[in-house]
Amino acid sequence: MIRCAGIPNRLALRYHDEMKVIYFCFLYGILSLPSLGANNSPPPRVPKLDIRLTHQGFKTDPENFVVVCNSAAMAIARYYPKRVFKPILIPKADNGFPVKLDRRGPKGESQVMLSIGDGWMWNQIAYQFAHEFTHILINEGQPAAGPNHWINEAFCEVASYQALKQMAKDWESHPPYPNWKGYAKHHSSYADKYLGKEKARPEGMEFKVWFSKNEAALRMGQRYPKYGLYKYPAYQFYQVVKEDPSQLAALAYLNFGLKNSAISTRQYLARWKTVLPATHKPFADRVALVFGYSLPN
């Protein structure tokens, strides 16, 4: 006897009836599937992530908090399918500012601290965690970028924008829980707060003119660039990244093999291009054009 979901098990069927059930099962299965359009494609396979909120007494639901962080990280980690990530601890979620800690956890875990008021603004959680997660990708186990660290910060900011935009798509079609689908649009609108057209002309200037006036200030900050300045180049970088988000895979090479961190901005980008796989070299060229640079082949 053949049994099928949606068919009462008490029915004992003869052969010719069983053929009808096979057809019904097939039809039932097809009609039960979600539509397979571009907007409903399941997220690609990504590395397994182990994220733990170890902050005690924080005003949030720990499970939901981790689900949001995981969703933000997966929006970026999907471009690193072979990378093995250490567990990520969040020992403090109401720190004065978000930061990826240099010191590891008791078992070698990566550590991130966030600056979330009460833990219920999921788009803010996603925005901050995606930024710090990208620091893990770029900076963990790599040489320090020195005066060029602002470029790292700008790309981490870009990753946050892209993560929020990707989460909006993912949650619309495959939310972590069905009742979270309605929140999808809030991820996109949160990113839009940082992508206003005024960022295209900082202080009313063409970006290249603005950069020539502010490059020294950006480089002076080193580990922590002058607050807010790197968001202007981040806006420019995002215009390049959004055309092909898979190029985020190139960020892991920013400091790879870096021996002299005191090099100029142009030299830093040119050196980055030399260590990139061939598929990402044109991306470095497009990023350099933001500043009006032409990199050697």
Image (tube, rainbow, N blue to C red):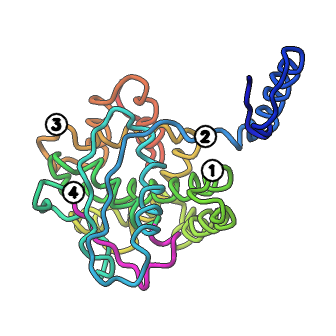
Magenta residues, as a range? 111-125
| Cα–Cα gap, marks 2 and 3 | 36 Å
Marks 3 and 1, how far apart at CA: 39 Å
- Quarter of the image for the C terminus: give it: top left
Disc 2: which residue: 42
Label 4, label 2: how many angstroms apart (C-alpha)? 28 Å
Q: Is residue 76 above or below residue 112?
A: above
Q: Residue at x 42, y 67 (%)?
A: 63
Which residue in the structure is indicated by mark 4?
Answer: 110
Which residue is denoted by mark 3 in the rendering?
A: 257
Query: Considering the numbered disc 1 on the image, is that residue within a helix, a strand or a loop?
Result: loop
- Label whose residue precedes the other's in the sequence (2 or 3): 2
- Contact check, label 1 and label 2, Cβ < 8 Å: yes
Q: Nearer the viewer, residue 47 or 254?
A: 47
| Mark 4 vs 2: CB contact within 8 A | no
Residue that badge 1 annotates: 174
